[in-house]
Amino acid sequence: MAKKKAGSQSEMLSQAIVQGMQEKKASDIVILDLRMAKNAVADFFVICSGNSARQLSAIADAIDEMVSKTLNENPWHIEGKNNKEWVLLDYITVVAHVFQNERRSYYTLENLWGDAKITSIEN
């Protein structure tokens, strides 16, 4: 029973992250459902792309604000805000990845988690 509740909380968190991404015009937003993936480090990855360092920073800030405002949660850990090529906001059960286009093409997280259910979000 507790797993189901955690899953729905993770789903709400994923949706709040998507809203923050959309607010700052992030592109190519996808949700990777990792709950059935072997050795997954989180329930969901939410991934998007931005065109510039400034946009990445704005997207990351919008995610943080949206999640704080709607769910009263703060990230457990944030990485990459200084180099602004790949910003990661870790909410433990959900991890938001904000990439510059070139970095996203290089790392292809979607391919690394091939057994995840992938949902593309319309912009």
Image: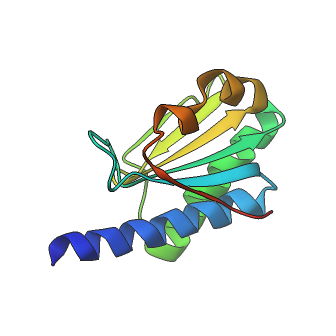
Quarter of the image that includes the C terminus: bottom right
Identify the residue at the far front of this view: 115
Viewer-closest of 46 and 72:
46
Viewer-closest of 56 and 121:
121
Relative to 28, say whether 68 is above or below.
below
User: Would residue 114 be found to the left or right of residue 93 on screen?
Assistant: right
Residue 18 image offset from top left, x and y in percent: 63, 62
Quarter of the image that includes the N terminus: bottom left
User: Would residue 6 be found to the left or right of residue 44 on screen?
Assistant: left
Residue at coordinates 55% horizontally, 69% vertically from top-left? 15
| Quadrant of residue 50 within the rendered picture | top right
User: Can residue 25 be seen in this snapshot?
Assistant: yes
Relative to 35, say whether 54 is above or below.
above
* Number of numbered labels in the structure image: 0
Residue 7 image offset from top left, x and y in percent: 32, 69
Residue 86 image offset from top left, x and y in percent: 62, 30
Residue at coordinates 69% horizontally, 62% vertically from top-left? 121
